[in-house]
Image (cartoon, rainbow, N blue to C red):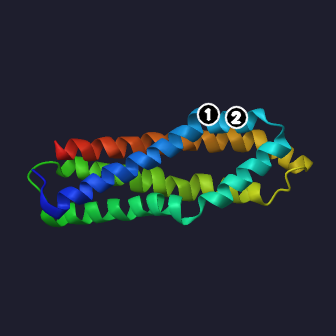
Amino acid sequence: MIDGPYFWLVVLGVLGTGLVAGVFCAFSTFVMRALAALPPAQGVAAMNSINVNAVRPPFMAVFAGSAVLCAVIAVVTFVLWPDEGTAELLVGSALYLFGSFGLTMVANVPRNDALLKLAPGTTEAATYWPTYVREWTMWNHVRAIASGAAAVAYVLALT
């Protein structure tokens, strides 16, 4: 059984990865659909505003903080190698670090940066917008599933 400070690290890992999964789930299930239903100029402007505002302390503390927590949990797991929950802890950490945080850096952020370079009312923006929505949302589905699965893996490690 995991106990002491290590237990609380994992509980925080469940909370952080679960919160991020919820944010990503919201975007996958209704935010992106709502933005896609807007005229392209409005959708691009709204998404650019969301992307700029996402990189602020409240969300970044949860998103990046969870990545740090997952890395710490993985390192502590390798050092302590507990009798129970080791596989779940390592899988949970890998799911979040690679499937959520890493995927954000290689799939979603580059698309956000490309969109931000386009003026909302231009033909370029209108042409790119459907591709952006489709690709960004597809990768966001993966991030949501990975974050949720990481939370589940951490919960399983605690049981």
Q: Residue at x 57, y 33 (%)?
A: 29
Dot 1: few (<14), some (14–19), or many (≥20) neighbours within 10 Å?
A: few
**Is residue 127 at least partly visible in the picture?**
no
**Is residue 107 at least partly visible in the picture?**
yes
Query: Which secondary structure lies at badge 2?
Result: helix
- Please tell me in which quadrant of the rendered image residue 70 appears: bottom left
Dot 2: few (<14), some (14–19), or many (≥20) neighbours within 10 Å?
A: few
- Image quadrant in which the C terminus is located: top left
For residue 30, the mark is 1
Percent position of residue 11, x then y? 26, 52
Percent position of residue 36, x then y? 74, 36
Left or right of residue 154: residue 127: right
Q: Residue at x 19, y 61 (%)?
A: 6
Q: In this figure, what is the number of numbered marks?
A: 2
Is there a contact, CB below 8 Å, between mark 2 and mark 1?
yes
For residue 138, the mark is none
Left or right of residue 133: residue 104: left
- Please tell me in which quadrant of the rendered image residue 137 appears: top right
CA–CA distance between discs 2 and 1? 6 Å
Percent position of residue 79, x then y? 17, 67
Q: Residue at x 56, y 43 (%)?
A: 140
Percent position of residue 104, x then y? 54, 54
Query: Which secondary structure lies at badge 1?
Result: helix
Q: Which amino acid is tagged 1?
A: Phe
For residue 34, the mark is 2
Q: Residue at x 36, y 41 (%)?
A: 149
Left or right of residue 28: residue 49: right
Q: Which amino acid is tagged 2?
A: Ala
